[in-house]
Amino acid sequence: MIASGTSRPRILVTGGGTLLGDAVAAALLAEGADVTLLVRPGAEDRLTALGQRARLVYADVWEPSSLKGRARGVQAVIHTVGGMTADPAHGLSFSYLNVVSARNVANMAVNSGAPRMVLLSAVSAPWVPRGYVRAKREAEQYLERIGLRATIIRAPVVYLRGS
């Protein structure tokens, strides 16, 4: 909860228009944060009413040039984008989905002057693909190497019936 008399923290959340990104943004808004949602171009139709309560910026976490300056003025970047399902035939490896996106977002944070990054990672479980967990660990190691103040959240797998 935000203490009274303090300014509202400015937070950038990647993954606007996704289940996880929207849930994190909604929780932050409920706590009084000033939230900016990073939305992939073309994902506007997936935004809920949340899109009216948060500031929206459009960029693609896999395209570094689109991220330039997007985290300027925020106290933290929360990265929720990644994937548990690889599709090598379409160039979607676990590394591309999880490491490349995290690396690009971390570099955006550093270059924009954001002092902190939160990475939603994953726990290992028998039903979780090993390649996915390896990619998440590689993303975590990258954050450690570049010296960004990082918080790693190894959340359990989230399952919602029908999604």
Image (cartoon, rainbow, N blue to C red):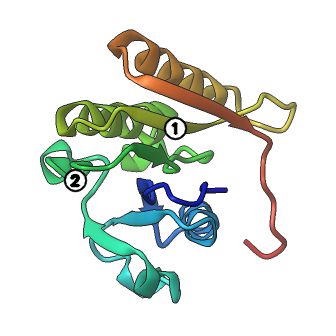
Label 2 neighbourhood size at 10 Å, few (<14), some (14-19), many (20+)?
many
Q: What's the residue type where badge 2 is placed?
A: Arg
**CA distance separating discs 2 and 1:** 16 Å
**Residue 45, above or below 123:** below
Residue 4: which quarter of the image? Answer: bottom right
Q: Are marks 2 and 1 in contact (CB under 8 Å)?
A: no
Looking at the rendering, in which quadrant would you find the C terminus?
bottom right
Residue sticking out furthest to the top: 145
Looking at the rendering, in which quadrant would you find the N terminus?
bottom right
State the residue in front, 106 or 6.
6
Secondary element at image label 1: strand
Give the image location of residue 133, x and y in percent. 65, 28
- 114 lies left or right of 99: left
Give the image location of residue 39, x and y in percent. 35, 67
Label 2 sits on residue: 70
- 3 lies left or right of 16: right
Secondary element at image label 2: loop
Residue 76: which quarter of the image? Answer: top left
Circle on res. 101: none
Q: What's the residue type where badge 1 is placed?
A: Val
State the residue in front, 131 or 138.
138
Label 1 sits on residue: 118
Q: Residue at 43% of width from left, 31% of height from top? A: 99
Q: Residue at 60% of width from left, 56% of height from top? A: 2
Give the image location of residue 94, x and y in percent. 51, 35
Q: Residue at 48% of width from left, 73% of height from top? A: 17
Label 1 neighbourhood size at 10 Å, few (<14), some (14-19), many (20+)?
some
